[in-house]
């Protein structure tokens, strides 16, 4: 560890950080203070190391609960300070720090139990063998952790066990016990307080070299003993320029995030535990800006990695910084506010009790809109985003796409937005320009203020196109179009069709497309009696979906023949059987567009239903039954999709198609929207999130 003050610039930067050069966002959420900003970004805490002393300025800062939510005793809990002589404990300073945290309602991040440095001479120079040194370790760990049991939310169990080349650092523990002292310490700590989070902590892990590999090896070693390690602490003693003690300045945000991810891939949390960033004095405006940018990269990398739980700076102030006026001016000119981002909607980790089920699993997370784009990527500001029943299924992890197979993704199937930034290949190809209005059926990611997406998934539309109406088209209307035109069934004027769930978004779209494209089809649709009048307004003859004689109703409306094509949106055994019986004998076709059998109101049960229905299709209804899926999967199919989409857009532009929009929501009303999907009450046509603040205000949503 290094005993340097954290610069004042750091606090100012962190208090206002999200991205270095933020894109303007109309809808914002403002959080004041470091801890408040980190909490708004979905993290657990922003903390500071503390040495309790008579410093009114530092005390006043520490008392601001918006600034800090965690305290780490800088020295008071180290072995030398707390047990300077064997069996003689100096609890005073450690108690002061513990009380400083608990009295303010802060987390207490306790530091440290087993470390080669600041170790009393009676331990470092004792005549130990394996058994006696383990006994000393156990007595110390039991005494210290026992005193603060239930107060320490995190413990640095072992500190700085590695050399720079990833080998083990020389210490009395390594010489006497060997590498096993590390898992032994974790075993003792777990027994002493199973409620706290147990960490390995070290510096220079941030660069991703041999020392980082050593930390990974330590985590695996602990796990190989069948023990628990909850996290790895990266001390983050960094520089913003080359110095005599550190030749490599702070890495890029992406590089830092990659290192964090390499550790969290071990199923452990990570945290920056002792953050400070040094620079050579005297300070200049350029150096202060470089220092601010380095802090931006550090905090941004933590925001980018889900299991980075928090940041602790190694002290409250830097009394050596005298250019306060210049610092403030630089920050005002160059650093943005963390929560000026309205973050995307996402689901909680699988381990959370809220990770499955109802809309309460949705939460906000900060989105890095300033990361480097790959060659064909485009950053798009979302203006509107569609809401659909598939969001309900995605939310519980039941949708058959690997991108949303596990919680942690951002839902949202479709959006309309504005191009903000282009990847290198997109720039050179001139396919898109900044400011272009685009639409997309992205399947995941749309429920956010911004989307980073491949340019191949975007369709350019006109700046004058209504973003609410166009946003209704990608999922519902393209699904309906595919059913009518791309499902392998050639419909002729005068043919009849049966539409399952006719009052829903897809059913509505089918009816409107039939009319807009003058297809001259006879339409019969199933729905609840409460929606009969709405379905009639679409030109559909309604029949009661809950009726026991549904087939007879269809036959009576078709002179006993049945319909030419039935579009089944339920996908149950019963609905497929009814659809077949309601079609013309031997020649009628059934197109299954959904597999909803066994699915509960909250979206669960899809995988079971899909397996069940594939078996039914293969064994019972192969000749006249097929699945239809709308997402394009090849360049050729994408070209067809894009051309079809623009044909529908043209009908909207000419006033021949007016998409049925039943309800508009702000993005922060996601839970309410999902509840409406689950209930099904009064849901017909399409629901849309209006993300753009100006457009929301025009529609009385602001």
Image (spheres, rainbow, N blue to C red):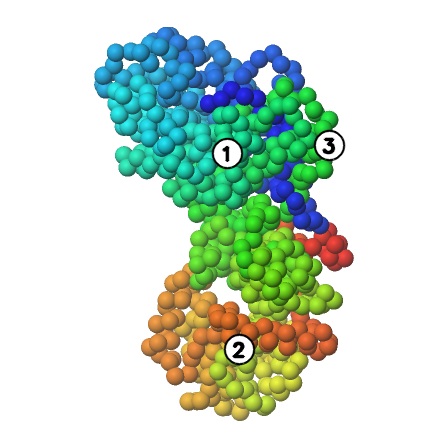
Q: Residues within 10 Å of mark 1 (few under 14, many from 20)?
A: few
Q: Residue at 30% across / 18% down in the picture?
A: 172
Task: Estimate the x, y position of residue 566 in percent, counting from the top left.
Answer: 50, 80
Task: Estimate the x, y position of residue 381 in percent, counting from the top left.
Answer: 65, 55
Q: Residues within 10 Å of mark 3 (few under 14, many from 20)?
A: few
> On the image, numbered disc 1 is attached to which residue?
248
Using the rendered view, name the quadrant where residue 431 is placed. Answer: bottom right
> On the image, numbered disc 2 is attached to which residue?
483
Q: Secondary structure at mark 3?
A: helix
Q: Secondary structure at mark 2?
A: helix
As drawn, 560 above or below 80: below
As drawn, 100 above or below 662: above
Between 204 and 616, which is closer to the camera in this rendering?
Answer: 204
Residue 399 visible: yes
Using the rendered view, name the quadrant where residue 279 is placed. Answer: top right
> On the image, numbered disc 3 is attached to which residue?
329
Task: Estimate the x, y position of residue 447 in percent, counting from the top left.
Answer: 59, 55
Query: Reading the chain from its start, which is encountered first: label 1 or label 2?
Result: 1
Q: Residue at 60% across / 40% down in the picture?
A: 40
Residue 71 visible: no
Query: Reading the chain from its start, which is encountered first: label 2 or label 3?
Result: 3
Q: Residue at 64% across / 47% down in the picture?
A: 342
As drawn, 491 above or below 236: below
Residue 499 badge: none
């Amino acid at each position: 560890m290094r005993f340097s003050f954290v610069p004042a610039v750091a606090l100012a930067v962190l208090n206002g950080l999200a991205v270095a050069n933020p894109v303007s966002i109309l809808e914002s959420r403002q959080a004041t203070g470091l801890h408040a900003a980190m909490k708004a970004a979905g993290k657990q805490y922003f903390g500071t190391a503390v040495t309790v002393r008579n410093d009114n300025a530092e005390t006043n800062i520490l008392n601001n609960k918006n600034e800090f939510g965690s305290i780490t005793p800088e020295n008071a809990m180290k072995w030398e300070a707390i047990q300077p002589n064997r069996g003689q404990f100096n609890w005073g300073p450690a108690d002061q720090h513990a009380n400083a945290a608990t009295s303010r309602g802060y987390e207490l991040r306790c530091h440290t139990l087993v470390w080669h440095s600041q170790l009393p001479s009676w331990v470092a120079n004792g005549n130990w063998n394996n058994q006696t040194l383990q006994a000393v370790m156990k007595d110390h760990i039991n005494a210290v952790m026992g005193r603060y049991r239930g107060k320490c939310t995190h413990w640095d169990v072992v500190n700085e066990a590695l050399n720079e080349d990833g080998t083990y650092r020389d210490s009395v523990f390594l010489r006497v016990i060997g590498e096993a002292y590390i898992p032994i310490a974790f075993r003792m700590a777990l027994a002493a307080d199973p409620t706290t989070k147990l960490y390995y902590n070290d510096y220079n892990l941030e660069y991703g070299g041999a020392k980082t590999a050593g930390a990974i090896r330590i985590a695996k070693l602990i796990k190989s003993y069948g023990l628990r390690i909850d996290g790895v602490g990266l001390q983050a003693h960094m520089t913003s320029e080359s110095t005599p003690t550190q030749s490599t300045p702070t890495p890029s945000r992406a590089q830092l995030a990659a290192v964090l991810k390499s550790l969290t891939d071990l199923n452990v949390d990570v945290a920056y535990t002792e953050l400070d960033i040094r620079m050579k004095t005297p300070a200049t405006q350029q150096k202060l800006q470089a220092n601010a940018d380095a802090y931006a990269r550090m905090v941004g990398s933590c925001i980018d990695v889900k299991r980075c739980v928090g940041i602790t700076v190694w002290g409250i102030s830097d009394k050596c910084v005298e250019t306060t006026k210049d610092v403030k001016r630089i920050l005002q000119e160059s650093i943005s506010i963390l929560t000026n981002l309205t973050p995307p909607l996402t689901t909680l980790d699988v381990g959370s009790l809220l990770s499955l089920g109802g809309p309460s699993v949705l939460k906000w997370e900060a989105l890095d809109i300033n990361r480097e784009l790959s060659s064909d990527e485009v950053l798009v500001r979302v203006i509107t985003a569609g809401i659909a029943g598939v969001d309900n299924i995605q939310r519980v992890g039941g949708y058959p796409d690997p991108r949303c197979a596990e919680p942690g993704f951002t839902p949202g199937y479709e959006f309309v937005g504005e191009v903000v930034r282009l990847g290198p290949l997109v720039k050179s190809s001139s396919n898109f320009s900044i400011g272009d209005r685009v639409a997309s059926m992205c399947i995941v990611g749309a429920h956010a203020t911004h989307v980073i997406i491949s340019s191949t998934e975007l369709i350019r539309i006109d700046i004058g196109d209504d973003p609410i109406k166009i946003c209704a088209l990608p999922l519902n209307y393209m699904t309906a179009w595919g059913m009518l035109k791309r499902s392998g069934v050639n419909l002729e004027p005068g043919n009849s069709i049966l539409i399952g769930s006719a009052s829903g978004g897809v059913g509505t779209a089918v009816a409107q497309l039939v009319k807009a494209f003058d297809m001259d089809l006879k339409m019969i649709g199933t729905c609840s009696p409460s929606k009969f009048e709405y379905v009639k307004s679409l030109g559909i003859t309604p029949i009661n979906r809950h009726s026991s004689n549904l087939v007879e109703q269809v036959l009576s409306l078709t002179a006993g023949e049945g319909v030419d094509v039935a579009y089944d949106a339920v996908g149950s055994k019963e609905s497929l059987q009814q659809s077949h019986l309601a079609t013309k004998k031997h020649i009628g076709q059934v197109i299954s567009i959904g597999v909803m059998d066994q699915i509960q109101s909250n979206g669960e049960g899809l995988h079971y239903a899909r397996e069940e229905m594939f078996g039914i299709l293969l064994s019972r209804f192969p000749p006249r039954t097929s699945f239809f899926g709308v997402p394009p999967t090849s360049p050729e199919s994408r070209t067809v999709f894009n051309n079809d989409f623009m044909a529908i857009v043209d009908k909207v532009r000419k006033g021949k198609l007016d998409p049925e929009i039943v309800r508009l929501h702000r993005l922060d009303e996601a839970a309410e929207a999902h509840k409406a999907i689950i209930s099904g009450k009064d849901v017909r046509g399409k629901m849309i999130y209006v993300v753009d603040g100006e457009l929301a205000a025009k529609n009385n949503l602001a």
